[in-house]
Amino acid sequence: MPSAALCELEYRPQSPGTYCPRIGLIGCGGITAEHLAAYRDAQFNIAALCDLRMDQARLRAAQYFPDAKVYQDYRQLLRDESLEVVDVTTHPAERLGIVRDCLLAGKHVLSQKPFVTDIQQGQRLVELAQQQNVLLAVNQNARWAPHYRWAYSAVQAGLLGELFAVHLGCHWDHTWVEGTEFEKIRHVVLYDFGIHWFDLVRYFLGGAMPRRVFASTARVPGQKLSPNLLAQVLLEFDSAQATLVFDAGVRIGPWDHTYLAGTKGSLRSTGPNLHQQSVELHVAGGSWQPELTGRWFPDGFRGTMSELLCAIHEGRQPCISAADNLKSLQLCFAALASADTGQPVIPGSINRLPD
């Protein structure tokens, strides 16, 4: 068993070291509790918070960064020249203009996912970031969930050989979106939630793009929620295949699992949810079960911001760059179009979120 190689696998979020820029956050909704808790634990310098609801911005400041300045208008936040980085957490529709203004103000940006609803608009933001000589990253925080990160490191170390199968399944209760803005998203499972898994497929397969994508959705018996809660996706590659299965109406006995197979071995991860996972690696020399520490929340949020800060400090593009993320969105948009038409779709042929 390659125990020495296994011991060297890195899966914890990296540290930007002594680089500690002043950071602003625009949008203080529910998910930002996870952002800010992770940033506080990592001792990042959150210097400003902004939300249209001043009470929400003040609440987040009191909870996590009491010395941070609070704004209602994000343009006022952007006038602070001491801020180097901005985390934009609003919904996609309003986020587009905010990200553009952040880039024009010379700020590095971490955008919440899904990045954009139009590939061409996203490409223009990528080009603007290049013109402004700043970095634009997307918060694909699943990449730093401990079990996904360890699996990726195992693949990168060559322990599985050439990867030819990626199968991801999530069986959980997503009905919490009822009555929220998320219920208005027609493909909430495949788009707002599923973008993580489209991104993970590319992550594990070294950025490869499939030839075709086929997807379908359905309703859970007795379902009252507007968007369909059942979805499945098949992705066809030249020398690999991937499947995604989402059962978002599981109220009892939830389960999340990952299976990767390559020419030298396989890896599986399973557990009752995405925070509690047990990983097994199987190769010719035997099997291995690493004892992982951490959870997706907060490690995923710490990981994305750390990656952006490290990239700024090291003068490189982050692995979660917006340019790379547009390819993950192309997979997602292809799947949405396939689910609507019942036909396989070529990635890259659909450049906008279907109406």
Image (spheres, rainbow, N blue to C red):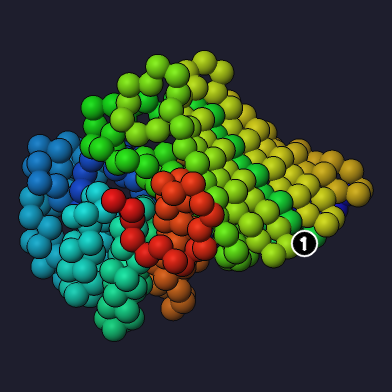
Residue 172 image offset from top left, x and y in percent: 49, 27
Residue at screen point 14% across, 65% down = 78
**Residue 154 appears left or right of 21:** right
Q: Nearer the viewer, residue 24 or 246?
A: 246
Residue at screen point 52% across, 16% down = 252
Residue 311 image offset from top left, x and y in percent: 44, 70
Residue 129 visible in rendering: no
Q: Nearer the viewer, residue 263 or 99?
A: 263
- In the rendered image, which quarter is residue 192 located in? top left
As displayed, is residue 222 above or below residue 212? above
Q: For the view shown, which residue lies furthest in the bottom direction?
A: 131
Is the residue marked by circle 1 packed among few (<14), some (14-19), or many (20+) residues within 10 Å?
some
**Residue 3 appears left or right of 301:** right
Residue 124 image offset from top left, x and y in percent: 29, 75
Q: Identify residue type, mark 1.
A: Glu
Residue 123 image offset from top left, x and y in percent: 34, 73
Q: For the view shown, which residue lies furthest in the right direction?
A: 285
Residue 272 visible in rendering: yes
Count how many numbered circles sit on residues in the image.
1
Residue at screen point 49% across, 22% down = 250
Secondary structure of residue under mark 1: loop
Residue at screen point 44% across, 78% down = 315
- Kindly identify which residue carries mark 1: 162
- In the rendered image, which quarter is residue 129 located in? bottom left
- In the rendered image, which quarter is residue 205 located in? bottom right
